[in-house]
Each structure stands twice: as C-alpha cells, then as structure tokens.
Image (tube, rainbow, N blue to C red):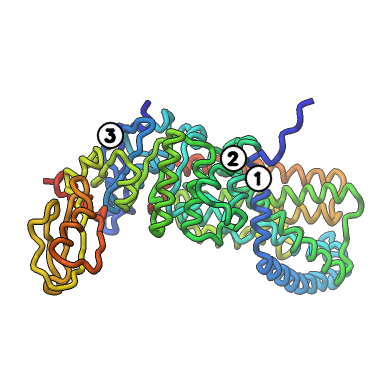
Amino acid sequence: MRPLPSPSRNPYWRFLVAGFRGQSAYPLATFAGLVANATFGLLKGGIMGAAVESSGGELAGYSAATMAAFVWLGQGMLGSVNFWGGSDLQTRIKSGDVAVDFLRPVSVQAANVLTDVGKGLFALLPRGLPSVVIGVLVSSMALPPDATAYVLGLLSLLIGITVSHATVYAVATSGFWLVETRGVSVLYMAVSGFFAGLFTPIYLFPDWLLTLALLTPFPSMMQFPIDVLSGQVTGAAAAQHLGVQVVWLAVVLGVGHLTTRAGRRRLEVQGG
Amino acid sequence: MNVIKAEGLTRVFTGRPDRKNRLRRSRHVAVDHLDLSVEAGESVGYIGANGAGKSTTIKMLVGILVPTSGMVTTVGLHPLKQRRALARRIGVVFGQRSQLWWDLPVRESFSILSAIHGLSAADERTRTAELVDMLEMGEFLTTPVRQLSLGQRMRAEVAAALLHRPELLILDEPTIGLDVLSKQRLREFLVTQRREHGTTLLLTTHDMGDVERLCDRILVVDHGRLAFDGTLDGLARTVGARRELVVDLATATGDLVDLDGAEHVRSESGGLRQRLAFDPQRTTAARVLAAVSERAEVLDLSITEPDIEDVVREIYRATRR
C-alpha cells in the first residue's frame, strides 16, 4: 500500500493551519471578544428568555432551554463566522497586496477562504467553548441530545463557518471593480446578521420575511448550525439542514470563483 | 532562449469620467508599444523616473495586469492564461509588499511556500538550509515576520522568492530603505545566486549601486518607451556617469585645476572644500586623491555617486533632443 501523502505537503491544508495559528497570535483581542460575547449574551438571553416566558413558555417552537441554547451557541459562533463584512482580501485588493496572491501557483479563492476558515476554527477554542460554558452556568440551555446530534451539529457548524467566509470572499471580490468596498461591507453587516439569526431566531419573523431569509445563504451560517447543535431539529430534518447548507456553499463558492476570474482582468494594482 | 519577450506592449489607464462631459475620460499611456527581449542568464536593470512605466511593465510580465494591446511571454508562457504554470517558474519580490505570513515565524513562511511550490520535505530542508546560510538568516528564523527589521525582512523576502529555484527572478526596488551593509550583503548574494544557478535577473531600482554591481544590461524607460538599451559602459559613455570626490583641505587653496583624470567642479569656503569630478572608467578615486595630496594636505574626503535620477535625466535629455 502506498503511504498516504502527508497533509503538510498540501498547500491548502497549510493555508488552513496558517489561519488557525496566525489567529492565536492575538490572545488579548480574543479575550476582549469573549468578554463582549458574554456581555451581549447575558443581555440577549434576558430579553429572549422573557419573550418565551411571556408567551407561556413556548415561542415559535422554542422552550426556555432551547432559546438559551440559541442565544449561547450563537454568541459562541460570533468569533468564527463573519457578520461584519470586512476581510483580508478586501484590504489586500485596496492596498494592491493581492498581487502577491496571484503570483502563487494556487487558487486565490481557496487560499483566502481556507485561511479565514482556519481563523474561525481557532476562535472556537477561546471564544466558542467558553461561551457555551457560560451559557450552561447561567441558564438551563439545551445541549445536543445524543451523539448523532453532536456529529451532525459539528459538521453543520463547520459548513456554516465555511459558507460565511466563502460569502465574504465573494463580496470582497467586488473590490476588483470598486476598489473601495467599505460601503459594500456596511450593507453586508446590516443584512447578514439579521438574516442569519444573530438577533432573534429567524422563525420569529413574519412568513414573508422568513421566506426572504431562506432565499439567502445567511441562515446557513448560524441559524441552521444552532438548530442542529441544540437538537431543535433532528433526524431527516437535520440532514435537510445540512443539505441546504451544502447547496449554499456550492453557490457562494461558484460565485466567488467567477468573480475572481472576471475581476482579475480588471485588477489595477496601485502603486509600485 | 528568450526568457522575456514583449512586442508592442501597451497599457493605457483610463480615469473616471470627466465631471463636465461624461463621455470624456482621462487617458494615461503608461507603457507605449514597448519591445523587449531578455535572454536566459542575463541580468537586466530596468530604470526610469517615477511614473515612467517600470512597475506597469513588470505587472504585465507577471500576469497581474492585463495589457491594453501587444503581446508578452514570460519564460515562454502567457502570463494571464498560464498564471499558475508561470508562478512555478518565476520568483518576484516587490520591495513594498510582503509575501510572508505576518504573524508566523519566518521558518513557517518558508515551509508553507515550499508546500505551495510542491517541494518535497527533503528538498525543503536542503533548500531552506542553503538560503538561510547564504543570507545569514539563522538568528531570526523563529521570529514572527512582523518583528523583523527591514533588512532582515528583505533577506527573507528574497529567500522566499528563490525557494523553488525559479529561472527568472524579478526584483522591484529590492534595496529600497536598506542601509549600506544590508544592501551590500543582498547584492553579493544575488551575484552568487546568479553565478551558481544561472538565474535570469530583472530588477527595477532607484539605486545606482544596484545597477553597477548587479546588472550587465540596462534598460531606461521614459514615458513607457525604451530610451536606452545597452551596457553600463554604454550608459556611462552616453551620460558620463561621473563620481565626485569632495576634499576638505587644511588650508585655503586655489582651485585644483589640471589634475590628471579629474575635473574641478567648484570650490567652497574660499578653497577649503573642493569638488572634483572623475570618470571611474578611466581613473580611480585613489589616483585622484594622490594627485590632490601632492598639492595640498587633505583633512577629510567623501565620494558621491551619481544619482540614478541624474543618469535618467541625462538619458531623457539626450534621447528627447
């Protein structure tokens, strides 16, 4: 049998690891992020808990326990998904450093997305896990009911993080045409979190707004992974969530691929 | 074999539409029907004033800028269509941009780049060791890139561009901001690298020292067109790339005219300081100094090299006539 090729010789694996390790260089920023997560988690938990209680212990399919899970899992994911719309690619296009990316014999898209996913995965350790621990300590949050929910939940989480960074990548490629894309980021920030379920579960939306949300990739970034991780959806419904996430992943990757190819011809690297 | 071949290479930048007339846009011809060919093993200095079209040319050569018209091949490949194949065979250093991972140790950047270029683990070890030794990078190999001094970072950048043993190394302002010693070390390394691997070198610079010590062919670009293509000797003949010896004398002395091989430029402080121009192709600073010492006691001296800007200005003046 031929020995398996070592992952350390695979450039894409190395990008993932580089993102993971690069992020670990900023412990103070990570800690500050955790404090902010926890503070807003307590606030959000109080409001959403009160909403469930005032509607008789059940709201849009959420109990007090699953609503607490929604809040704290969401807070835990905040360091790993991107709802602010900015990215390294955005600054690299503006500064012209993106030229360096194109001078490497690899896919620029894969290199950028995997580096960001690596950063997101790292953030699960110092920000994700502690948020869940805080949630368990301060509330009666629901945990995955069985091993399958854990496996599917973590898989859904991984896809969600990747969908998020692949989408932000595609958004950043607008810089090939616009150069200055802060406006695009602000628009992204306004829309993405809202439709992803950052503020309230999207199932609390009126039907037309829920339909609109489901026509975007945003629920795949946070709402769906939370649904699966908290056991809010199980079995075939959970598998369906994952299926939808995979479709969105393919869509945003496809868009990013096309915009990279078209944008490269528009690129005018500024300065020396 | 032509490592670089460009014919009628042109790039026009169009600005934003005019405020008064929406149909009018400003046009700037950065590179204008440039013909260029570089043979394997050559070492070419590409010089010109700011905005003359140096960087624009290089960007088209490496495929990060689309030409408006004309054709270009680099190591026989189409830079845009064969981006990845080209990236495997060339190394590029932009003095103002980094290809290293900011937060990671230098060694880790080298390792990732080795994986990107498909080097085997054994090859990565030997090549890294070789470059670390030659560029004296041992002391900062485990330091994160963001903590490196400029001189250290430039050495690491050059090493990073050479890990995969490219046939063509393109350096855009490689010595910008470096101190004299760092410049010297980098130049010596590049000379050795070229001798041992036959690497073709193309560099843009504002430093006459780079050109004199590294290049056997010089291209001067002006308004996107070639204004000069020849050797350093040829350049010196065209513009008279003279050096100036500045001597401080013990006593006020009359103008030092009629010195062998040197020409009196001007005297200052009543003759206490005098400037003498000489052609390094015909005499040496030592000989001029010896001639001066016969006439007056020299307290201090300095030598100023011609600025590349002066050389370029002279070339522009000569060719625009």
> What is the chain letter for disc 3?
B
Number of numbered discs: 3
Side of A259 where A41 appears, left or right: right
Distance of label 2 from label 1 (alpha carbons): 9 Å
Q: Which mark is residue A228?
A: none
Q: Secondary structure at mark 3?
A: strand
Residue situated in front as seen by the camera: A205 or A80: A80
> What is the chain letter for disc 1?
A
Quadrant into which the N terminus of chain A falls: top right
Residue situated in front as seen by the camera: B59 or A45: B59
Residue under numbered circle 2: B116
Q: Amino acid at mark 2?
A: Ile
Q: Secondary structure at mark 1?
A: helix
Residue under numbered circle 1: A14
- Residue positioned 80% across, 54% down in the render: A227
Q: Is residue B217 visible?
A: yes
Q: Secondary structure at mark 2?
A: helix
Residue under numbered circle 3: B35
Task: Give the class, few, some or many, for how many residues have Cα within 10 Å of label 3's Cα (few <14, many ≥20).
Answer: some
Task: Give the quadrant of residue B307.
Answer: bottom left
